[in-house]
Amino acid sequence: MHLEIEAKLKVDSLAPVEESLVRCGASFLRETIQTDRYYDTPGRDLTHADKALRLRSDRKDGRDRSILTYKGPKEQDDYKRRVELETEVSDSEAMDLLLGSLGYAKALAFNKRRRLWQLQGCEVALDELPLVGVFVEIEGPDSGAIWRVQAMLGLSGSPHIMASYACMIGERLTELGMKQREIYL
């Protein structure tokens, strides 16, 4: 079982953060477009229990891949902390049909541009999303490592956002009166 620990920070621009990453000696890993499809029951049982079921598609090491992820409810903490279980799937279309057969329907789909960096044992993601803007996610082995990287990047005063991207985009679609549940860059 894997425990995901991360800080999510809203920023005005990714450029100064990227400059800080370079200055701090971070390693650039890759840039990708990730497409996330979230599934739930018709009664939104997963959402109401603060859980998530996601099928993510992107490109890594020159090949397309899909990852099915379950996220458990968030734990009380200064950082976003929750159980995360992932497995790679070879056929995302078949997985979509399988989830539908089990009673799950696609509740929301969106993509994001992500630039991944490695710094001090943490993965730093610079994310650009439709409707909600740009964010920095710092995922690490523990709260102390995340705090140190956040400080190194000059983001120690930035408040942590506990809401998921799916929640933020869903709320924004509702605010705009949009019925569609698929939104792309």
Image: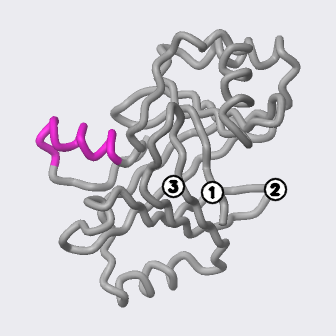
The residue beneath circle 1 is 58
Q: Is residue 185 above or below residue 101?
A: above
Q: Is residue 170 above or below residue 38?
A: above
Q: Are marks 3 and 2 in contact (CB under 8 Å)?
A: no
* Stretch of the chain drawn in magenta: 167-178
Residue type at mark 1: give it: Asp
The residue beneath circle 2 is 61
Element class at badge 3: strand
Determine the CA span between mark 3 and mark 1. Answer: 6 Å
Residue type at mark 3: give it: Thr
Q: Residue 69's image quarter?
A: bottom right
Residue type at mark 2: give it: Asp
Instruction: Mark 3: give few (<14), some (14-19) or many (20+) Cα within 10 Å.
Output: some
N-term mark: 3 or 2:
3
Q: Is residue 67 above or below residue 150?
A: below
Residue 121 picture location, percent across and down: 82, 36
Q: Say which residue appears at 73% left-offset and 43% top-offset.
A: 141
The residue beneath circle 3 is 35
| Magenta highlight on residue 170 | yes
